Image (cartoon, rainbow, N blue to C red):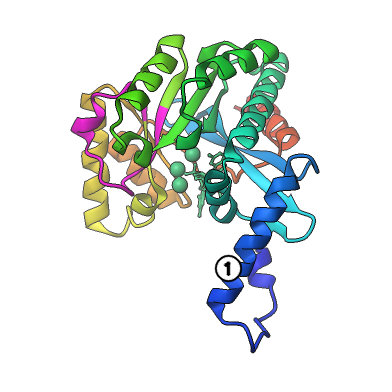
Amino acid sequence: SAREADPPHKCFYTSDLDTEVNTRIAIKSGLARALDRGEFSLVFQPKVDLRSWTVCGCEALLRWRSADLGNVSPASFVPVLEETGLIIPVGEWVLETACRQCRLLIDRGFPKIRMAINLSVRQIRPSFPATLTDILERTGLKPDDIELEITESVVMKDSVEVVQLLQELADMGVHLALDDFGTGYSSLSYLKLMPLETIKIDRSLITDIATGAEDAEIVRAVIDMGHSMSRRIVAEGVETEQQLAHLRRLGCDEIQGYLFSRPIAGPDLMKLLEDYSTYA
Ligand code: C2E
Ligand code: MG
Ligand code: MG
Ligand code: MG
């Protein structure tokens, strides 16, 4: 990767902390102009249904290529977008761009690829359903064509407003998924109260599933309890055949990870789907 190719750090005067602070300042000022400069793009990672072994959806993931900083990872810039409130305009750009890609897929003969979009807690506010409705109308999509991924921290806020808003979205017919399950402390019984159809098990629990007995037992319990609550289970970050075989045995519904495909650009996704439907 680009990071591994970086030359060793040759700075003797700046502490790591100073460097971090400076980077954060540079990220902040860069992000303020990134939308206007057209520095954002989306990549898409397929999700595969384990029973039919077909692509059933994909997740839109934001990428930022800064004129000054080069490629910056979402782990570094998404928190800054959230702190500065820039996640509101950028999040709308993500929604609209992902929906346009979904429209393109439908027009090319792939009507069943559900588009998953990550939603930050800051975006969950009273005006959001109307914003989403506008975007769906502009792009000619049905609510059923998309899925919104929200993280455990959103659900754990346990605010009446958030639950009401999620219910409003679910009533519209938008699918909702809980992202990164297993990284926070939310319990599955608590999730029963939320209109979340899908639970995505975080990569950190999947990594050692084929080698570590404990993680495998946790994943088994999540899958079984999720199923008893009629939720679909997606495993994130599946990288090996061993992990896949294990997840099959445990009855997992879908997988997403480098094993099947890395996140790829829109045209590459189209090509993958076309090749796949030819040989399947
Ligand atoms: P996430 O939503 O949990 O997305 C999955 C992350 O795992 C992605 O990282 C993806 O590239 C990575 N991944 C997928 N398969 C594998 C695998 O097999 N191995 C490994 N090592 N990694 C895998 P990415 O793209 O760097 O995104 C990181 C996080 O940034 C996302 O986690 C999400 O929380 C956030 N994010 C990305 N795009 C958006 C966005 O448009 N809006 C918001 N609010 N957050 C976003
Ligand atoms: Mg996600
Ligand atoms: Mg995730
Ligand atoms: Mg994650």
Is any atom of residue 258 visible in this view?
A: no
Q: How many marks?
A: 1
Task: Give the quadrant of the C terminus.
Answer: top right
Residue 249 located left or right of residue 92: left
Task: Decide: few, some or many residues near mark 1? Use Cα within 10 Å; few <14, some 14-19, many ≥20.
Answer: few
Task: Give the quadrant of the N terminus.
Answer: bottom right
Residue 206 located left or right of residue 74: left
Looking at the image, which residue is at 21% across and 31% down? 190
- Circle 1 is placed at which residue position? 21
Looking at the image, which residue is at 30% across and 47% down? 184
Vertical side of 127 occupied by 151: above or below: below
Looking at the image, which residue is at 68% across and 18% down? 103
Q: Horizontal and vertical percent for residue 29?
A: 69, 54
Q: Amino acid at mark 1?
A: Val
> Where, by quadrant of the figure, is residue 28 drawn?
bottom right
Vertical side of 78 occupied by 125: above or below: above
Magenta span contains residue 182: yes
Secondary element under disc 1, as helix, strand or loop, is: helix
**Residue range of the region highlighted in magenta in the rendering:** 177-198
Residue 172 located left or right of residue 19: left
Q: Horizontal and vertical percent for residue 24?
A: 60, 62
Q: Horizontal and vertical percent for residue 11?
A: 66, 85
